[in-house]
Image (cartoon, rainbow, N blue to C red):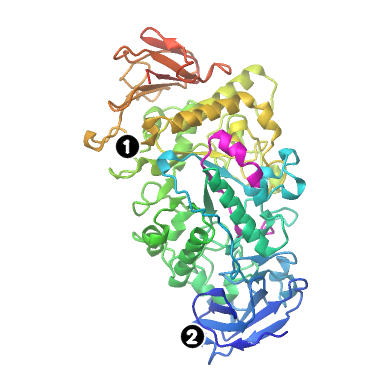
Amino acid sequence: MPHASRTGQSAPLGATVYPDGTNFSIFSKYASAVELLLFKADDHSKPLQVFRLNPETNKTFYYWHIFLEDVQEGQLYGWKIYGPYAPEIGYYFDGNKLLTDPYAKAVVMDTYDREAAKRPGDNTAAAIKSVVVGGSTYDWEGDRPLNHPYSHSIIYELHVGGFTKHPNSGVPDDLRGTYRGLIEKIPYLKELGINSVELMPVQQFDPADVPDPSRTNYWGYAPIALFAPHTGFASTQDPIGAVHEFRDMVKALHRAGIEVILDVVFNHTGEGGADGPILSFKSIENRAYYMLDEQYQYRNYSGTGNTLNTNHSVVRRLIRDCLRYWVDEMHVDGFRFDLASILSRDENGRPVQNPPILWEIESDPVLAPTKIIAEAWDVQQYQLGNFVGDKWAEWNGAYRDDMRRFLKSDQGMVPIAANRVNASPDLFRKLLRDPNRSINFITCHDGFTLNDLVSYDQKHNWANGEGNRDGHNDNHSWNCGAEGPTQDPEVLQLRQRQVKNHLTLLLLSQGTPMLLMGDEVRRSQQGNNNAYCQDNELSWFDWDAVAQQQDLLRFVKALIQLNLNTPYFQEHFYWNSPKALGGSRCRMGGVRNNQPDWGHDSHTLSYTLKNNNYQYRMHVMVNTFWEHLNFQIPKPKGGKLWRRIINTAAESPQDIHTFEEAPVIRGGSVYVNARSVVVLVDGQ
């Protein structure tokens, strides 16, 4: 039955369902004509109906709109927008291309062909189809975002597909690599001690956005539908089912006390540069959605061919509407903003002191309880420690780089490492800033895994098909004496110790710790530090490693519990803040207590945490020297004896203890093995 149409209205943008039909609205300033196409769910190679919008009645200012009677949830649709195709002045209107609605909350990808979107001519049969979402009810069963404070958060960065896609995951075949598959592994996350997962991109991305068409975009940093959950992670072909499966995953994680943070990409899209496909924004209003230079070429601060014009009023609204949708309708707890420094650039690409979009996100009352985390750099600027506002947390890339250098015994790193374990006060200079807004990490998706960090001096990215030219060259890694796999027992022992050293300092530094998926069981990518296109066992979580690495897994679980149950790591003020604020004291030292050696050739650091309101002190000793050393320790107080709860040089289970099990230390010094960490506490 053909659908009758009415004028419709300009707001809300996208497809909005009402009892008697659906309103459609889209922004396009310079379009000369706009068409809305409807498609059958079981055959969307050609349109079921085409509605050409009348600019006299179906346009209000720059918004084109139409109301279609009896259209309800599940209807497939797309836009065609006509106007000048003149790249030399920044216009890419092409009425032959079917366009994804920027506000689409679900999409259908099963006939999508990226190359057809690049070639001249009509691509309707091979285009992405938007899907109407709304009108049905979802039973959240009382669920709300958890909103854990940073001070009580252990973040785990994972890839939804890669977490359960391996055949040895134990997940049913039809659920491997899906939202539902992740639900199956919640007990593992819970037992590990994770209470916050940071999901790599789940906004619908283009898996075909790769230089080599024989490979797949695995990471997902190629968004094409910002409101829509990625269909490739759904176990169903039903696009509405994908929305509900995402919600099921969030609800299940919340029931387990695990919050959900999304890695969102608002800095570029999967449309690429001038030679990229026309999928959506290019033919809707290229000059509004993208940053262009004086010659109308794409500015490329993202390194991917285009840069979203994030401080244009229309794009700002899109971003805020999108964030609110994921919070209100999908119940997510927070966002990590990929290349967030791009959001500080004006429409001409210049960094500005008070970027409107960043302040709008910070001050949005809907987002008030929501975590917002910045990757505070782009390809041309590094803003770590200088990001705007008070609410933003930041991925501390300096923590990653400096702690790597410190633990592999680079010179001149001791005073820098002392700052890093103290939540980097040299970078984040605001006295009243929450130190836990420093997101500390050693590894993340971009770079070596922790196993590979201690197993390779050089990247080995040949599998990516780019001649090993891609990926970072400066990794601050050390292979401990042999490149890659080895049977040398001394090298293997040292690697295990270095893994534990990194994890120990990460969990015993002030700030919020973030672990990379699989580091707790030494997941390896065989030296590949840029596995963006490796949707295979190279990137997937190898669940056999859980049994193989039980000793390390036990160590990590205990470390996480130590962090969560130690008041020093739950504080909201920097250690050594003015006493009136209530912060703990952190006394730095070296091999001699309270006498740090800041020299260029120093390789020792110790620090003592004390607070008269707490029942015990903690003393951490780090020896990155290649010889064993004796460290002086603070004198016992109040009849309490020191107990050694961690010794990374010891074999399991002697490497980590509960306080009750820990051996008592008698005397005024402790022997610390070469390249190891020892931790003491003096009573509870």
Check disc 2: other Cα within 10 Å, few if <14, some if 14-19, many if 20+: some
Of residue 55 and residue 233, the one placed in the foreground of this image is 233
Which quadrant of the rendered structure holds the N terminus? bottom right
Q: Tell me the amino acid under the disc marked 1.
A: Tyr
Residue 312: x, y in percent? 44, 70
Q: Earlier in the sequence, mark 1 or mark 2?
A: 2
Q: Residue at x 71, y 32 (%)?
A: 544
Residue 458 in the figure: left or right of residue 302: right
Comparing 330 with 428, the one in front is: 330
The magenta region covers 182-210
Question: Element type at marker 2?
Answer: strand
Residue linked to disc 1: 574
Whether residue 595 is visible to the viewer of this picture, yes or no, is: yes
Q: Is residue 165 above or below residue 79?
A: above
Counting from the top left corner in percent of width and height, residue 262 is at: 53, 52
* Residue 61 locus on image (x, y percent): 47, 84
Question: Disc 1 on helix, strand or loop?
Answer: loop
Query: Based on the displayed image, in which of its 4 quarters is residue 16 positioned?
Result: bottom right
Question: Residue 541's x, y, as percent?
Answer: 67, 39
Q: Tag on residue 60?
A: 2
